[in-house]
């Protein structure tokens, strides 16, 4: 049992798991909207690499700041400190792999990749460099989860649509906006529990978040509202979604609601980084099974 738990912790604490989740969500865009999959392996490898690079790069950059709260260091941070060298090497390697992949994608993707890179950098680096009192994007009141949701949405939806040159003329903008909003709502819903988890640390940092303002129960209700919004947006898409895919999509959302309902600030890290984040894979599996078995 211990080797299994150690492997799970390796996946989650190294941010490999969240990278897999973003890859699955990106593939889901291809499935739902029937996009051409000629360049799919390259896009998914690029998404995994850049997600791994970004999450670990941010965590390693902020490591020194976290160490000032030695009495509050959790199991995940202890793992990162223990494996800091190997994690740094892997982060650089996957960053290079991501850059190599960009050579094989549609160059129009850079219209989105460059702003995403900027948001990721200034999420942990002060917006005004060399000015100590300058805030990072993460420090802006109540905006943390919206920035995360925006970045995820652009990666998961915009990259596949642009790389495949989605050929729908005047409908393209409307379809893109609805697809982006749908993913945005889902990501907001599964990110709110993480702000519940971080309430103690956010209080120390004097960071204003929705759970600190509205409370845990209100945050859970808000997550459910965003999930309902995600369902409605897919239902209202100008592209008719296959019934089996849509039913799988709804089931995935219902399971996600049930998991989020158990959120509280005393849950273990594996509940948030494993189960809540893993709702992306649950959603992916539900849609995939529904599409494969109930055509």
Image (cartoon, rainbow, N blue to C red):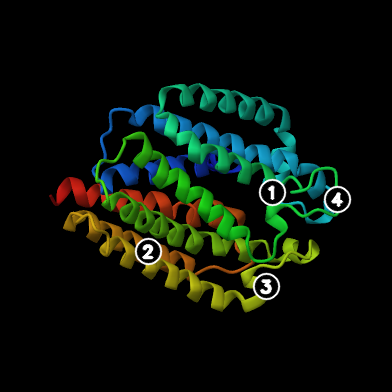
Residue 204 in view in this figure: yes
Residue at the spot 62% in from the left edge and 66% down from the top edge: 196
- Work out whether 5 lies above or below 184: above
Tell me which label, 1 or 4, sits earlier in the chain: 4
**Residue 257's spot in the image, x, y percent?**
41, 67
Furthest residue toward left: 295
**Residue 192's spot in the image, x, y percent?**
55, 64
Residue 4 in view in this figure: no
Q: How far apart are marks 2 and 3 (CA)?
A: 24 Å
The local crowd at label 4, few if under 14, some if 14 to 19, many if 20 or more residues have their Cα within 10 Å, is: few
Q: Name the residue under label 1.
A: 75
Q: Distance between the residues labelled 3 and 1?
A: 23 Å
Q: What element carries label 4?
A: loop
Q: Which of 276 and 56 is in front in this view?
A: 56
Q: Which of 49 and 169 is in front in this view?
A: 169
Q: What element carries label 1?
A: helix
Q: Mark 2 points at which residue?
A: 230
**Residue 268's spot in the image, x, y percent?**
61, 58
Residue at the spot 17% in from the left edge and 58% down from the top edge: 243
Tell me which label, 4 or 3, sits earlier in the chain: 4
Q: In this view, does 73 lie to the left or right of 190?
A: right
């Amino acid at each position: 049992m211990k080797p299994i738990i150690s492997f799970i912790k390796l996946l989650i604490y190294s941010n490999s798991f969240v990278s897999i989740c973003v890859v699955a969500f990106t593939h889901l865009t291809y499935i739902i909207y029937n996009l051409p999959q000629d360049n799919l392996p390259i896009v998914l490898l690029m998404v995994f690499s850049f997600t791994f690079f970004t999450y670990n790069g941010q965590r390693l950059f902020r490591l020194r700041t976290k160490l000032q709260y030695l009495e509050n260091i959790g199991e995940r941070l202890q793992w990162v400190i223990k494996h800091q060298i190997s994690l740094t090497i892997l982060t650089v390697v996957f960053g290079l792999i991501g850059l190599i992949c960009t050579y094989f994608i549609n160059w129009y993707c850079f219209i989105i990749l460059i702003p995403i890179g900027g948001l990721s950098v200034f999420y942990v680096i002060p917006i005004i460099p060399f000015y100590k009192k300058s805030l990072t994007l993460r420090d802006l009141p109540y905006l943390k989860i919206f920035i995360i949701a925006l970045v995820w949405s652009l990666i998961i939806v915009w990259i596949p649509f642009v790389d495949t040159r989605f050929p729908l003329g005047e409908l393209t903008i409307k379809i893109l906006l609805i697809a982006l909003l749908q993913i945005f709502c889902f990501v907001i819903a599964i990110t709110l529990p993480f702000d519940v988890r971080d309430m103690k640390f956010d209080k120390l940092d004097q960071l204003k978040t929705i759970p600190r303002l509205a409370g845990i129960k209100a945050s859970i209700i808000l997550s459910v509202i965003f999930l309902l919004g995600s369902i409605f947006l897919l239902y209202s898409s100008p592209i008719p979604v296959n019934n089996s895919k849509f039913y799988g999509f709804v089931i995935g959302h219902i399971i996600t609601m049930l998991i989020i309902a158990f959120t509280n600030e005393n849950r273990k890290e594996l509940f948030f980084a494993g189960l809540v984040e893993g709702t992306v894979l649950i959603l992916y599996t539900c849609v995939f099974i529904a599409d494969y078995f109930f055509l």
